[in-house]
Amino acid sequence: MASRGATPSGGAPSQPGQPQPGSTKEKLPGAGETFWTKDYFKVPEGINKRCDLPPEAYTVKERYDIPFTRRPGYSATGDNIKVQVNQFRVDKAINQDVWQFDVSISPTPLARIVYKKVWDSNTIQSKLQSCKDPWIYDGHKLAWSKNKVPELRVTVDLDAEEGKPSRKNNTFLFQLKPTSKIRLESLFAYLNGQMGWDNSVLECMSFFDHVLRQGPSETMKLIKRTFFHQGAENMQLNQVTEAIKGIYSAIRINESINSGGSGLGVNVDVTNQTFWIGQPFEQLVRNFLASVDRKWQHIRYPDMANLLAPVQTSTASGGQTWGMSEAFKALRRLQNIRFRVKHRGKTQDKKEYKIKRFDFDSQYGAKGACAKTVEFDKLMPDGTTRRYSIFDYYNEQYKAKLQFGNWPLIVTTKAGKFPFEVCEVDRFNPYPYKLDSEQTQMMIKFAVQRPTQRKQEVMKAVSMLNWGADKYLQSCGIKIKPEMPMVPSKMIKNPLIEFGAKKTVDPKVSGRWDLRGIKFLKGNPVPLTSWAFVTVDRCVDKPTLANFISLFKTTYKGHGGVIQTEPMTFEIPSGQDHAQTVSDVYMACGKQNKQTPQIIFFVLRDKTAWVYDRLKKNADCRWACITQMLQSAHVRKAQAQYCSNVSMKVNSKLGGQTSRVGGAGFFKVPTMMIGVDVSHGSPSQLQPSVASICVSMDKDAAVFEAAVQTNDYRTEILTASNVNNMLGPMIRTWVQKNKTVPQHVFYFRDGVSEGQFIHVMEYEFEQVKKVFQLVTNAIPKITIIIATKRHHIRFFPEKGDKNGNPLPGTLVEREVTHPFYYDFYLCSHVAIQGTARPVHYNVIHDEVGYKPDDLQRMIYHQSYQYCRSTTPVSLHPAVYYAHLAGYRARIHENKAVTDQVPHQVKAQVMSKPGLMAKHDNTSTTSGPTGPPPPLLPMGGPNAREDAKLTFKHTMWWV
C-alpha cells in the first residue's frame, strides 16, 4: 500500500483541480496521457500583463482550489544586519471608491492608436476637464475616475481636430459608460488577511498600476513596465542596434503591512534594452544587410535594387519562376518595425505605421514589386478612375521624384504600401532578436554597474518619476516615499567545507577558498587508463601541449585523481571534418589502450561556438564519450589554478566528488533533491523546448545525474511523458544506490513566472507523485520551491564586500516579500562584476515542513557544494545543474550544427519571427501542433554499452 507523509504545519497538501462541467480533455503532444486542453494553461481574463502580480492572481476560483503555503514564521538565527532595497513604500493610499468606465468607439478602429487620438481630442478633453478630478486612461477600452458622471456620447471628427477637410472614415462615435465601482478597501482587506484574492482585488491592483504609469507615460515612452526618455544613456552596438537604459517601475504587494506600511511598494530599477537605431529606412536596410553578411558590407545604394530583385528559381515540375533573393529574404527580420512617413505634406505627420511584410509577387518578373511596377486605380474628382504607378503618383501628388523607384515596397498592417525612402524609423523600436557574441560583450559592459552607481541611477530614476508632483497620484491620495527603505535582514553563517584527507576549509564571509594542497573528497573511482588530448587546427605545438599535460597530471594527482597511463596525443589540421576527428580519435584511443576511452580533451583555438558544439555533439551522441574542452590560450599559459579548475570538472565527470558541507549529516531521513528547468529557443527561431531534470544521488545531495528531452514547443510545464521517462529511471537509480526509498524530496523549479506557479502545482506535482508511486510504491513528503533570478529587487547593504555588494548568506524575508505566503530572497554568492542579484525563493508547497531557519540554511549551505567552483553559487546546485544540462542538450537536437558563424546568423535572420519569450505570464504553451522530434540519444548505434551506461550516470554536463 502506498504511504503518504503527514501534512506539515505550512498547509494542507494540494488537491488536483477538477474539470468544470462541459470542459473537454485532450492529449497534448508528447504528454503521454490525458489532461486539460491547452486552454488549461491560459491566464484568467482581465489580467493586466503590465502589472507585477503575485502568484495567487493567476488562479481561477472556478478551476483551482489550491492554496499556496503560508509563511510558517521568520528566521530566528543568524546575525542581524540591515540592507536597503529598491522597493519604495507606498506610505499613503486613501481607502476610497473609484469608478471604472468602459470606453468604446464606433466604428471600431483597426489600430489601437485611434483610441488614444480620440481620447486626446479637444472635443473629448473639453468634456472631461470640466470634472473636478483628472482621469486615468489605459489607452484602449478602460478609464477610471473619482468623478461619478453619467454616460457620455460624443461624435469626434479627427480630421476637423487637425484642421483638415472631413472624411467619412475618420469620424467616430465616442462612448464613455460607467460600469463598476472599484472598492479599494478590498485590496487592503486582502493585505490584512480579511478576505481571499478575487476579481475585486485584481481590479484594485490594475487601477493602482495605471495610476502609477499615467503621469510618466505622458513624457516618456512606456514599453511594458519600463519607461524610456530621449535623454537616456545609450550605446551604439552596430549600425542598426543600440542599447538604451530605461526605468523599470512596478507596484507590488509586500510584507510591509506587518511593520506599519500599507502593504504596497513600488519597485524601481535600471534596465537595459536593445532597439533598432532610428534612421531613414533605406539607410537601415543597407546597414542591416551589411550586418547579416560580409559580402554585403560595402554595397552601394545604386546597387541595392539588383541585390533585392527577384532571382530565377526552379519549380517542382522543372520549370523556372521568379523567387526571393537571399537579401530580400533577410528583410523578414525587419517585420513589425514601426515607422512614420516623411514625404511632402507628411513631414509633421505623427501617424505611426507597422511593417507587416515586403511586397513580393512573381508576376512582376525580374524587376519585382517596386514603385515603378506596382500600380493602382485612383478615383478622380470627376468620377473617373486613373491608373497610377506608385512612382508616378508620388511624383505628381507630392512633387517627390523617388530616387530608388526599383527598390521593394513596404506593406503595412493596414495594407498600405510605401517606398523605403519615404519612411523614417523612429527611436525606441525594440530589437527582439538574440545579439551576436560581439554585441553581447558590448551589452554586458554597458549594463554592468557597481552597487554604488546602480543605487545612484535608481535614485535618479525616482527623481524623474517625480511622484511628489504627480497630479494623478495626488488626486487618488497616493503618497510614495522617495527614500530607499532600510530593511532588517539576517546573515546566515557560512558552512565549513569538507575535502579529502579529513581537511576542512572555512571561507568565512569571503565566499572564496583555495584548492592548493587540497585533495578532493573522492577521486575518480576508476583510474585513468584510456584517454587522449587533441589539438584542433594545430592551435598549439607539441612542446606546449606536453608541458600542459605534465602540469595537469601533477595537479590532478595532487587533488587525489588517479592516473595510471599516459594520454595519447593527436594533432588535427585545419579543415578536417569534426565528426571524422572525433571518430578517428575515439577509435584510435580505444584500440591503443584496448579499453573504452574514458575522456578526451580537445584544445580549441578560441571560443567559436560551432566548433565546440560539433565536437561535443559527436562525442555525446555518437560515442557517449566524456569530453573536456580547453582554450589554447590557457594551455599556452599552463597555470596551476587553471589546471585545478579543470580538475574539478574532470573529477566530477569521471565519477568523483569535489567536496561536501562539513559537520554532521544535515538530513535526518533519506532525502532527494530534484532540480528542473525548461529552456526555450531564441524568439527568432522556432525550436522545441528542452526539459532537463537533475536528481541528487548521494546522502549529501552533492552528486547528481541528469536527463534531458524535448518538451513540446514553447511549453514551460513538463509533459507527463517526460516526467515518467526522465524522472522514473533516476528514482530507480537512487533507490539502488541508497538501498532505500526517499522519504523527503525537495523539488526545485527554475524558469517559471508567478503566472505558472499554479501549473507546477496542479500538473507537474501530480505527475511527480504518480511516478514515485509507480517506481517505489510510496509517495514521499515533497516540498516545491521555485527559484528565480528574473526580478528587479536589489540589495544595498549597510556593510557589504569591497564592491558594496551583500556578503554571501544575506537573507531578506521582510518588506519586499509576500504579505503572508512563504518566500524569501537569498544572496549566496559573490558577484564578480556589477550588482549582485539575489535569488527569489518561493516555497509554494511544503510537506517536509522544515523550520524557515533550517530550510534557508540548507539552501545556502548546499550552494557551497557546486562541483566546479571555489565559490558558492547564486542558485541552488540542483537548479544550476538542470540549467547547464538543458543548455548542453540544445546541441543534441537531431539537426546539423552549422559550420560557419555568418551562416548561423543568417539562419536566424532568414527564419520567421518567433513566439513569446520564456518568462511570459500570458501562456505556458504555444507553437505548432504535433510533438517535436526527440533529442538524439547519448550514444549512437556504434557506441559501446559500457560507455552509454557510464555516460548516463556521470555529471557529463559540467
Image: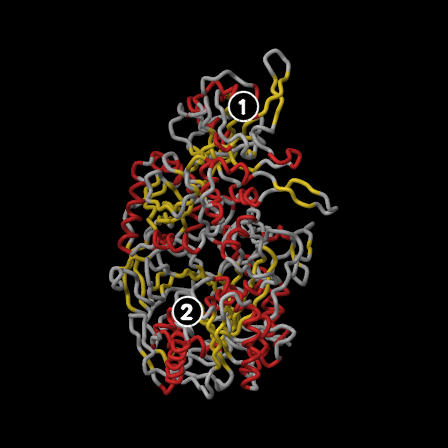
**566 relative to 955, above or below:** below
Mark closer to the chain start, 2 or 1 = 1
The image quadrant that residue 219 belongs to is top left
Residue lying at the far right of the rendered structure: 317
Label 1, secondary structure: give it.
Answer: strand
590 is higher (above) or lower (below) than 723 = below
| Dot in front, 2 or 1 | 2
What secondary structure is found at the residue carrying circle 2? Answer: strand
Q: Nearer the viewer, residue 923 or 905?
A: 905
799 lies left or right of 865 = left
Rate crowding at label 1 as few (under 14), some (14 to 19) or many (20 or more) other CA atoms within 10 Å.
many
What is the distance, in whole Å, between disc 2 and disc 1 at their CAs? 66 Å
Q: Measuring from the top left, give residue 232's x and y in whole percent.
A: 33, 42
- Relative to 352, is 618 on the left or the right? right
Amino acid at dot 1: Phe
At x 38%, y 55%, the residue is 441
Q: Quadrant of residue 868?
A: bottom left
| Quadrant placement of the N terminus | bottom right
| Residue 172 badge | 1
Can you say whether 417 is above or below 634 in the image? above
Q: Is residue 851 visible?
A: no
**Residue 498 visible in image:** yes
Kind of residue sitting beneath label 2:
Gln
Taking depth in this image into account, of 187 and 511 the one nearest to the observer is: 511
**Residue at image coords 57%, 83%:** 591
Relative placement, left or right, of 813 versus 921 is left
* Residue under pointer 2: 631
Pick whichever, 197 or 495, lies toward us.
495
> x and y percent of residue 839 in the render?
40, 61
